[in-house]
Amino acid sequence: MKLDSVLTQILWNRVISVADEAATGLIRTSYSSVVRDFNDFACGLFDVKGNLLAHSTKTTTAFIGVMPYVMRDFLQHFSADALEPGDALITNDPWQGTGHAYDLCIASPIFHRDRIVAYAICIVHHLDVGGRFGTTESKDMYEEGLRLPMLKLYRGGVFDKSIQHIIRENVRAPDKMFGDIRAQIVANNVCGKGLIGMLEDYGLDAGSLHDLSQEISARSERSLRAKIAEVPDGTYENEVTLPTIGSVSGIGIKVALTVAGDSIVIDYAGSSGEVSVAVNTTFNMTRSYSMYPIKLALDPSVPNNEGSFRPVTVRAPEGSLLNCKPPAPTWGRTMVCHNLPEIVFGALAKALPGRIMAGSGSTPLVFTYIRAKRKNGRTHVGIASSMGGLGANARTDGPSCRGFPYNVGNIAIETTENDLPIIYLKKELMPNSGGPGRNRGGLGQEFEFVVADGDLGPDGPMLVGIRGSGRKPESPYPVFGRLGGGVGRGEHLALNGVEIPNGPQQALGPGDRLSMALPGGGGFGNPFEREPERVAHDVALGYVTPQGALDDYGVSVDASGKVDMIETGRKRGVNKGP
């Protein structure tokens, strides 16, 4: 069948909808809030050669750039001749997968008329894989839990009993884990059913699907290359020092972004080597989170597929923080790799001033792993998530409490309280936390919870693994503004009112209180250029206090909510009075 422009677009939309249907199947059958509410997963559809055709709209962004390499590794280990209907492959190897053992990657062949025509992958973050639970204190990967190499999990539709026994004996909540594994199989089966339906509806075969894959990948590649060609050629650099993580300070990331014609090379030579805390990053994650900001800044509207990655080359020295080698510990790698988009943005902003958003108070991901024994002897395992404010840009204020760059959700407090022995005391927006600017950064938030007592409480200590940001305004790496915008504010982490470090595991008991504040996003442009009416509107909404309006924006707002233009003129250095 000839693929004209109209049919190509129809089929392109169809394969994306197939991946989205798979994600819906995953969400509806999963056991964990990490899937249902946090959306820490990805569903992908690949052609018979292992090229990415489409991924689910709801997905963790890092998985987009990882999936193609996971699929290629699967195909190197298992040839098409070795697969049959109902087979499923699995790995959680940090170097072949997503960078830490908590993410299980499951791939399934899709058969049509007795031959493989495509593959599906579903990646899900599981809450417990054994080992030390949720801490940056692990010294190597062996402390971080079960590590599954490339294995055949299902054979002809039957769960391999040996692998099943190994998993059951190595994790604390096997029923929940098996439930989510089966949900991943459901997602892949939904993906296969939807794709076969498309092939039959349009009379296509494996060859036609491969042609479609090549065409949409070529279109995506051409589109991104055209956008890169508009960026001035040159090498643009950026260097940051991350906040202290556990006991380790001075972690440096250096990037050189070289634009040459219609391609970009991102090189991290000069960055820190591997560190003793569990934040080392495998190259799959470094590559994914480095390609992502280029696509986001230059060509965000074209769907991602194999062609989206071809114009960008990423390099990081082997054995470094961003290309670690086994057995480096990697549990908390998001405390490093989530910063890469903003670091790349910092270099790209030198080529494209005015087009790059300010820093995000959600970078890196901040959330808490929680594990405790229930009174009935079973195990509580779950997470609590919260987001800071996004950075402002040249056109708009930053949204409040959004995840960037990882694209996961805020888990409702009702869900968290149902899963875990904690009670929230507050969860609220913080006034003045958004970085001031012509466009204001989104607001951060503060939350506090107490460990429940009595029948609702845990049986013994509750272990909490905390991934925080540490991006305080006074630190070398604040939530920065752009073009004169102010930094985001409001970062803290405290246990019973005492500041504690980000990363190490904490043991909490009934009555203990954990509080955390996540900073707002950075501002964009000179705050004194923000229209007084917009500042007054922020005051009316409670986003900015009257004193904050005067100090940060030079705008005087009286008790009635009106702008005092004379006082504002004096404060801003321009007397607009009579």
Image (cartoon, rainbow, N blue to C red):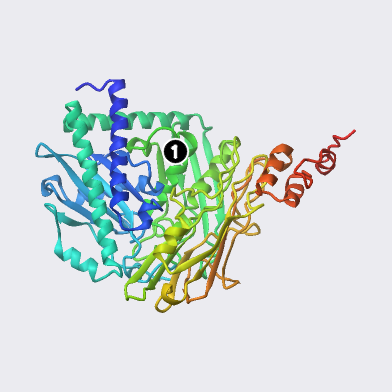
- Pick whichever, 524 or 268, lies toward us: 524
| Secondary element at image label 1 | helix
Is 441 on the left or on the right of 9, as rendered? right
Q: Residue at x 47, y 51 (%)?
A: 268
Q: Residue at x 44, y 41 (%)?
A: 265
- Pick whichever, 506 or 457, lies toward us: 457
Q: Position of residue 92 (x, y in %)?
A: 29, 58
> Which quadrant of the structure image shows residue 348?
top right
Q: Position of residue 367 (x, y in %)?
A: 47, 60
> Which quadrant of the structure image shows residue 419?
bottom left
Q: Visible in this render: residue 72?
A: no
Is 372 on the left or on the right of 178, as rendered? right
Figure check: 16 above or below 346: above
Q: Visible in this render: residue 312?
A: yes
Q: Residues within 10 Å of mark 1 (few under 14, many from 20)?
A: many
Give the residue pinned by disc 1: 295
